[in-house]
Image (spheres, rainbow, N blue to C red):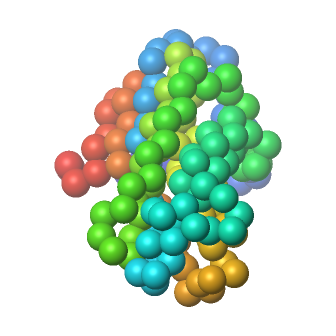
Amino acid sequence: MAELTHFDEHGSSRMVDVSTKEASLRTAIASGLVRMREETLALILDRKVVKGDVLGVARLAGIMAAKRTGELIPLCHPIGLDSVELTLEPIDNATIKIVATAKVVGRTGVEMEAMTAVSVAGLTVYDMCKSVDRTIEIDEVRLESKSGGKSGPFRRGES
């Protein structure tokens, strides 16, 4: 098993020094689910939520959050992302699947940026719809795949 990199030899937390790493194309894909009542999803899809276009606003919120991940996660490097894309699509009558793809040519990965984008997009859906449905759940936020860097590729479900 790989060692934890955010601790020094004394067990104190630290930001990992990436200054000697080679820059490479790094990509990460994360996903999550937002579960709600069927009536709530119908309101979202019909654009009848009082606060406006829920999916459009959530997409923008996720992109904005990805760009600020280094400010939110204490030991995460602030990076200049090259691309962040989000999709929010219903997968049944009561669930929206959020998928975020983040890319950078850099010395550190973008997994945290992709997962932050998914999380904040989900929270935005909740915020915009809480007046009609307080049962909304944000679930299964996770890394699906990543590429680039010394540790190589990762794809969920593969050993």
Rendered image quadrant of residue 80? top right
Q: As drawn, is 87 to the left or to the right of 115?
A: left
Q: Quadrant of residue 131?
A: bottom right
Q: How many discs appear?
A: 0
* Position above or below: 127 against 12: below
Q: Please state if 45 lies on the left or on the right of 4 as rendered.
A: left
Q: Residue at x 72, y 49 (%)?
A: 73
Q: Picture coordinates of residue 41 (x, y %)?
A: 46, 72
* Residue 123 in picture, x, y percent from top left: 63, 64
Name the spot of residue 120 as percent of width and height, x first.
63, 56
- When the figure is inspected, residue 102 is found, relative to residue 53, above or below; the finding is above
Judging depth in this view, the residue of 158 and 9 nearest the camera is: 158
Name the residue rendered at 71%, 64% in the picture.
Answer: 51
Question: Of 9 and 111, which appears nearest the observer?
Answer: 111
Is 101 above or below relative to 131?
A: above
Identify which residue is drawn at 57% across, 20% down: 82
